[in-house]
Amino acid sequence: MLDFTEASLKKVLTRYNVALEKAMTPEDAAEELYPKDKLIYPIAKAIFEGEEDDVIDGLQAAMDAGKNPIALIDDALMVGMGVVTRLYDEGVIFLPNVMMSADAMLNGIEFCKENSETAPVNKGTIVCHVAEGDVHDIGKNIVTALLRANGYNVVDLGRDVPVDEVIAAVVANKPIMLTGTALMTTTMYAFKEVNDKLVEKGIKIPFACGGGAVNQDFVSQYALGVYGEEAADAPKIADAIVAGTGDITALREKFHKH
Amino acid sequence: MAAKRYTSMAYASADEMTFGVSKYPVKAGLDLEIGAGYTIPEVNYAPRPEAGASKEKLVKEYERITTDIMARMVQVGFPAVILETEHVQQMSNNPSWGAEVAHAQKTIMEEYHDEYGIKCALRHTIGDIREDRDFLQLRGDKYSVFLEAFEECAKAGADLLSVESMGGKEVFDYSVLRNDIGGMLYAIGCLGSIDMEMIWTDIAAIAKKTGTVAAGDTDCAQANTAMFIAGGLLDKNLAHTLAILARAISAPRSLVAYEAGAVGPGKDCGYENVIIKAITGMPMTQEGKTSTCAHSDVMGNLIMQCCDCWSNESVEYHGEFGGTTVQCWSETLAYDCALMNTALETKNDKILRDLLMLSDRYRDPQSYVLAYDNAYKVGQAIVKDGDNIYLRAKNAAVECCNIVSEGAAGKLSLSRFETKALADAKASLDALPDDMDKFMDDCVTKYKSEVKVFLPENYGL
């Protein structure tokens, strides 16, 4: 069978991921970012490691020491999640780590809420859905996890969501942004209907769309559309809105890459 | 009919395998014989978004697509072509829509066959519509509509019947995003295989009744999801070593179609098809560099190595400088096939096969394992315990780990992350029981509690 020599192989391909790999391990990188407070540190570390039981144990210990449960959401859980999302954005850790950390964080938030009578504050509400006629929802599930990981309240409408149900959810929840994902060319057409009905009602929130067959050219055809090439763009678009970039043209300028 | 399990390899050695030649060629459509010494372009397409608005618009769209492809094939002098219509949901949910499209397409293909003698066949890939908004409903009311769609399309002109079935996907989607190799094994290897046996027994019966070909399935819903999430070299969404594990596990799952009566050609996006060809000797469609219109992969040349039909996966129908998209891509596919057929006729097929394979062999752990010599080894691991759907899937995964580890000791470079993911996966596999009943019991308890949308009754559990 034909084969390369080491030298000839280098003329055919470059494994850029191996060549560019950072020297620091994910655990070392995270260690540098954890808060130093001895009650908060184990919670943040448990979030990074995705260890749900350790998160609860850490929260209980912090509460026993007098920490306010609701304050712990921002001061411990979100801080730990911040380490995770930062290292994901920097390419140090991969998506499954984020998903497992998000599971642990959501468990922790529920635990904090159960131990308090006041409600936590979040960065804003976002309504997420998969287009009518489309049942492929893994992309939407990644988007909702990343948004929650970044401190947003997510109203998850699920998959195959009728256009009118999307509109009703937007009216009821007054989100800062709507997201839509689709795999098929024929189902993504529903995004245009959602857009038209929102515009008809005078609602002008950014409508971030992405997934399988969805592309920037298609999303640019309707007034509220902002194209997200990757699931990780969703929290970045939301952060830009929270920071004051609510204008669709400005968002497109920032996030449309092609 | 109970599935007849494979416990031995169709080929005595990996080197016996090449493109365009299978042990068991398949006659289909209008004078076509697949895997009988020549490769065939298989063109796949998607209607424009607005075409789904009505049945009339959809039928008209497929008529344009079919005419464009057949005209281009004749204009450039290609002897054979397969058209694959992957149903949009309207066509499978309303079997009469799918049947009308099949009839319209076949009528045009017959005209070209009558006038020019071009050999051709029509594949219809029915959409797996067995779900509602909240849950997979694999055995519910939609199953009868699903089977009706196959039968109506077969009666109306489809020659090759396929599907990309979804069994196990609810557990897989959860597991793959959590690096859970045991869950992936359960989802693809066990749940997927259970569902495959049910549906392919029924599809094969429909094919027999209608005089058509039960062609095969692909694990698009799971192994391709893993491959797409893993993405390119710089993407940070899934270790490529886990993506190839999902692929290795998908081979015994997709094999079930052939154990239940399918005869090939396996469907294009089944990158596991090279393993299945080694086991069954049946012809397979593959896609690679010519499917960049639909998605990127890391083995565009390599995956062509043993194909019998060569596909573009899917392209939206619209205009390009060189004609419509289906004309451009069908011509590209057909030129690739002309090169492979020239190699076959001049007895240079093994040289071309090895050049295709070697150009991508070390590009990624995925391509390394699917290189035909390594794919053959995965096949051997599967048939070793061919009668046990759990053990053979586990064997495939363990062999995949071994192949990547051996490769990494040589010219296959792995990132530290890929290496760690592989080691973690191997440790998880080593910790799994050998007893299928224990594994199934453990998993049904675990995933029923962790995956809200998992309904064991979908699998008769």
Image (cartoon, coloured by chain):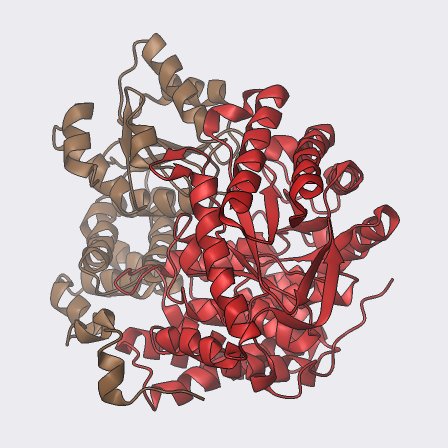
Chain colours: A brown, B red
Decide if residue B376 is on the left or right side of residue B333. right
Q: Specify the quadrant of the image occupied by residue A57.
A: bottom left
Q: Specify the quadrant of the image occupied by residue A188.
A: top left
Q: In this orientation, which residue lies closer to the viewer: B97 or B170?
A: B97
Name the residue rendered at 45%, 76% in the picture.
B352
Q: What is the x, y in percent for residue A240?
A: 16, 35
Say which quadrant the N terminus of chain B sits in: bottom right
Q: What is the x, y in percent for residue B11?
A: 66, 83
Decide if residue B57 is on the left or right side of residue B110. left
Q: What is the x, y in percent for residue A3?
A: 37, 87
Is A99 placed above or below B134 here?
A: below
Question: Does the image show residue A151?
Answer: no
Decide if residue B157 is on the left or right side of residue B235. right
Name the residue rendered at 21%, 65% in the picture.
A92
Say which quadrant the C terminus of chain B sits in: bottom right
Question: Does the image show residue B243?
Answer: yes
